[in-house]
Image (tube, helix red, strand yellow):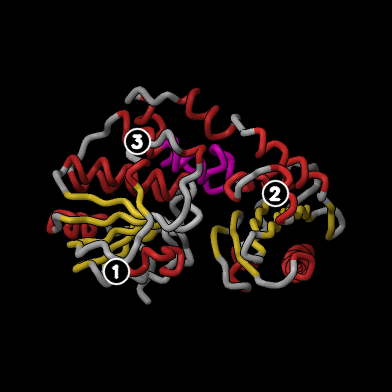
C-alpha cells in the first residue's frame, strides 16, 4: 500500500470532471464527518455541481444547526448513478454502512480523511493521518477548487475542527488549526454561540444519562484507568438516545491521576460499543484495532458482541497491558 498523503490535486480533478456527486459521511456521525460533508456540499454547489448527501445513521440533534444538514439521506439502494462518490472522514469502507453500495453506482470514487489506519480503499485517496481533522483538509481542498470562504462554510469547518480536537485540547491540535481559526473568525464566525451549542448545552436526558455513567465509575490499573458502563435500561430510564453518550467518556479523564478512560454502552441490538480515551503517551487506537475497531492514538472506538461485563473485562485487560508497558 502506498504511504498516506494528502492529494488535493487528484481530488480536485475528480470533482472538476464530475457533474453528479454523492458525498458520504460515516455511520454514527460526529462533528467532523458532518462538518466536512456539509462544507463540501456548499463548495460543490458553488461549482454548480449536482450534489447529494448521504449518511447511514441519525444526525445528532446537537448538530442540526449545520447548513444543509437537513439534506442528508439514508441510502436505499436505488440512488445513482453518480459521476463521483466522495467520502469524507470515513476511515474504512465498513464505516460507510449502507452507503457502501453507492460505490458500485459511481463512475469514480474518492475520499478525504485524516485517520492513520485508513487502508486507502477508494480509487483516489487524500489521507493525512497527522491532520487534526478532516475539515482542515477540506479547507485546503477549497484552494485547489478556487472556491472562496463564506460564513456558512466557516461554520461547517469550525464544527469539525473543534469537535475532533476536543475543543482545541487534544495533543494533535497544531499551528495549522489556529491559522485556520484566524481565517474563520474573519468571516463572521459566531464562535460563542457555536461553542455553547457544541460544548455547553445538554438536554435533560443527556444530563440524566451522565449521572448514570458517573454512578458506575470505577478506577482500575492502580487508579489510572477510569471505567464507566451504561446498560440498555439506563437509556430507557432516562429517555436518552445513543448520541447522548458521545462525550461522556471524556469525564473519565477529568480525575487527577487518570491516564486512560473507557465508556462501554449496551445498545438495543445487544452490541457493546466502546469509547476509549487516553492522555499522551498512552494510546488507545492500538487497543481498538485489536478488537476490530480503530481511531486516533488518544481517541478510539470499537464494538463487541459479548455480554456487557465480559466485554468490559476483555477491553480493560488490554488497557491495563498498555498501561504496564509504559511503566516498564
> Where's residue 47, x and y in %?
15, 44
Tell me: 308 left or right of 149: right
Picture quadrant of residue 75:
bottom left
The residue most toward the bottom is: 1
- For the point 60% across and 64% down, the residue is 302
Q: Quadrant of the C terminus?
A: bottom right
Q: Is residue 122 magenta?
A: no
What element does badge 1 sit on?
helix
Q: Residues within 10 Å of mark 2 (few under 14, many from 20)?
A: few
In which quadrant of the rendered view does residue 122 lie?
A: bottom left
Residue 326, compared with residue 23, is above or below; it is below
* Rendered position, 153 above or below 223: above
Mark closer to the observer (2, 1)? 2
Q: Earlier in the sequence, mark 3 or mark 2?
A: 3
Residue at (15, 57) in percent of width and height: 18
* Disc 1 target residue: 103
- 10 Å crowding of disc 1: few (<14), some (14-19), many (20+): many
Which quarter of the rendered picture does the N terminus lie within?
bottom left
- Determine whether 308 is above or below 258 in the image: below
* Separation of residues labelled 3 and 2 (CA atoms): 31 Å
**Residue linked to disc 3:** 67
The residue indicated by pointer 2 is: 236
Does residue 283 show up? no
- Residue at 57 percent across and 67 percent down: it is 293
Which residues fall within the magenta stretch? 158-178
Measuring 66% from the left and 43% from the top, which residue is drawn there? 239
In the image: residue 277, left or right of residue 97? right
Cβ–Cβ under 8 Å for marks 2 and 1: no
Amino acid at each position: 500500500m502506498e504511504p498516506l498523503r494528502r492529494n488535493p490535486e487528484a481530488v480536485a480533478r475528480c470533482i472538476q470532471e464530475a457533474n453528479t456527486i454523492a458525498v458520504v459521511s460515516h455511520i454514527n456521525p460526529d462533528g467532523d464527518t458532518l462538518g466536512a460533508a456539509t462544507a463540501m456540499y456548499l463548495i460543490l454547489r458553488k461549482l454548480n455541481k449536482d450534489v447529494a448527501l448521504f449518511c447511514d445513521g441519525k444526525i445528532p440533534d446537537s448538530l442540526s444547526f449545520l447548513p444543509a444538514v437537513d439534506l442528508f439521506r439514508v441510502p436505499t439502494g436505488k440512488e445513482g448513478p453518480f459521476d463521483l462518490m466522495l467520502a469524507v472522514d470515513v476511515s474504512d469502507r465498513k464505516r460507510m454502512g449502507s452507503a457502501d453500495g453507492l460505490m458500485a453506482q459511481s463512475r469514480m470514487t474518492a475520499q478525504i480523511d485524516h485517520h492513520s489506519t485508513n487502508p486507502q480503499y477508494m480509487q483516489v485517496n487524500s489521507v493525512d493521518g497527522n491532520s487534526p481533522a478532516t475539515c482542515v483538509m477540506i479547507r485546503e481542498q477549497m484552494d485547489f477548487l478556487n472556491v472562496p470562504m463564506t460564513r456558512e462554510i466557516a461554520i461547517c469547518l469550525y464544527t469539525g475542527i473543534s469537535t475532533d480536537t476536543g475543543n482545541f485540547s487534544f495533543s494533535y491540535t497544531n499551528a495549522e488549526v489556529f491559522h485556520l481559526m484566524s481565517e474563520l473568525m474573519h468571516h463572521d464566525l459566531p464562535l460563542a454561540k457555536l461553542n455553547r451549542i457544541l460544548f455547553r448545552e445538554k438536554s435533560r436526558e443527556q444530563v440524566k444519562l451522565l449521572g448514570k455513567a458517573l454512578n458506575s465509575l470505577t478506577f482500575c490499573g492502580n487508579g489510572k484507568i477510569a471505567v464507566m458502563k451504561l446498560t440498555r435500561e439506563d437509556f430507557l430510564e432516562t429517555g436518552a438516545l445513543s448520541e447522548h453518550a458521545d462525550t461522556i467518556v471524556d469525564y473519565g479523564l477529568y480525575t487527577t491521576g487518570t491516564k486512560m478512560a473507557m465508556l462501554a454502552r449496551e445498545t438495543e441490538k445487544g452490541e457493546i460499543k466502546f469509547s476509549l480515551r487516553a492522555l499522551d503517551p498512552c494510546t488507545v487506537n492500538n487497543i481498538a484495532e485489536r478488537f476490530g475497531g480503530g481511531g486516533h492514538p488518544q481517541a478510539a472506538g470499537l464494538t463487541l458482541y459479548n455480554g456487557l461485563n465480559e466485554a468490559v473485562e476483555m477491553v480493560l485487560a488490554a488497557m491495563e497491558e498498555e498501561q504496564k508497558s509504559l511503566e516498564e
